[in-house]
Image: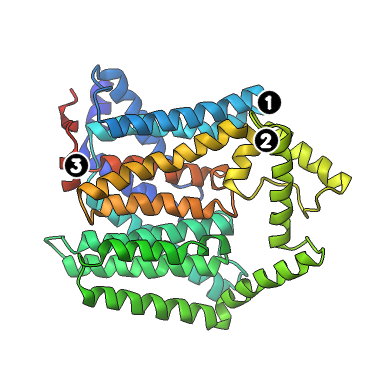
Amino acid sequence: MARFIRMSFLSDNISSVLVFLFFALSLTYPSGYVYPAIIMFLAGIYVVISNRRFFETTDDIKKIIATFLVFSLLWHLEVFWHDQALREHDKPFRFIAAIFVIFYFLKYPPRETAFWSGIAFAAVAAGTIALYERVIIGVPRADGFTNAIQFGNISMLFGLLCLVGIRWAMHKQQFRSLWIAVMSIGFLLGIVASFLSGSRGGWIGLPLILFFIGQQYFGVVSKRIITVVVLSVTLLLTTIYFLPATGVQGRVLEIFHDIEVYSEGVSSTSTGTRFELWRGSMIVISESPLWGMGRSGYEARIAELRKEGAIAPSIVSHSHNEILDAGARRGLIGILSLFALYFIPALIFYRMLRRNPGSPKAVAGLVLVFSYIDFGITQVFFAHNNGVMIYSFLIVMLLTFDSDDNAMYEYNVRGLS
């Protein structure tokens, strides 16, 4: 049996296929990312059990493991402490699963091509689905096989990573022009999918992230390519905004209308509801600042505040803000663990970028973190399975896939035996 597992699932080729499928199925099939992730997790368990030296790894990997472990355990503790349903353990456990996948990839690192081609496939698929839903079916907001907010933001993330991937494609020895074209199309369609979803929260940080990517590659990529990219992005965004069929202009103008009527006491709009939930969350945090109230306690308190007239959200929901949600559910400790989940990976990728300027994997890692911080302003992204899985597994993949950047690590991951 052990030999069958080793022959079937434990190889660089298989890990590469699993990475590609993780992305390819993420937005094209309901919860499609789960199936390759389960295989990665089981393979990781096998590697850990069969390998006595699995703790011998880099300091960066150890920091990620500790960060995932602390964030997950605090979340599990919240579920236990506040007597929540057993199903609430599911999302925090996925960070534990990602830790096992680290050891699988350290032993059998997936190829870099599998990562970037998977990202490109996912972005192109997302754009195609969004165009089909909006143009052919005529739905108000493209949502794929998840909700519109998750679909739009994840599509934008994949599109931005394709923009980063153009730098990787420029160094391909074979089919260089084809790879550049694929990444460019993936970038454009990922952004299109985001706008056709109408998920405005992801648009807030888009200019800053685009500026960051451009800053990293200015002087490294030719001015001709930068000019083409800038003109293409400008033309794309302008067209999307002014073309009535996209509905983007209406979604943007709706924000200003919502803010105006909120100042007049109307909170039943999308923006007004978020403002009220934010206000309610701050009340909850002030009442239980250290440990929080847990999910059930938070929702019960929000319902009470709504009944008392202290707040007036149109629904009782999570905070629609990642930081406020962490504070309301797990208190100051929860906020600190969330900051660690953001900033420790960001610091690792920043140092990687300092050592290797222009490194696509380092830029991609920072874009991932910046995007999640952006998404978290108006959405609790970690309240959704795809939000948890894509963040944790992408960090693992970026730190372990087989590329020239791995030369910076002191430990030879293939030395595991």
Reply above or below: 211 against 97. below
- Mark sitting earlier along the chain (2/3): 2
Do the residues under discs 1 and 2 have CB atoms within 8 angstroms? yes
Q: CA distance from mark 1 to mark 2?
A: 8 Å
Q: Could you give the CA–CA distance between mark 2 and mark 3, rounded to whole angstroms? A: 40 Å
Q: Secondary structure at mark 2?
A: helix
Q: Is residue 131 left or right of residue 210?
A: right
Mark 2 = which residue? Answer: 295
Q: Residue furthest left?
A: 173
Amino acid bearing label 1: His
**Front residue of this view, candidates 159 and 215:** 215
Q: Earlier in the sequence, mark 1 or mark 2?
A: 1
Q: Is residue 210 left or right of residue 374?
A: left
- Mark 1 sits on what residue? 82
Q: Residue 406 — which label?
A: 3
Residue at 77% from the left image edge and 53% from the top image edge: 313
Question: Which label's residue is closer to the chain start, 1 or 3?
Answer: 1
Q: Amino acid at mark 2?
A: Arg
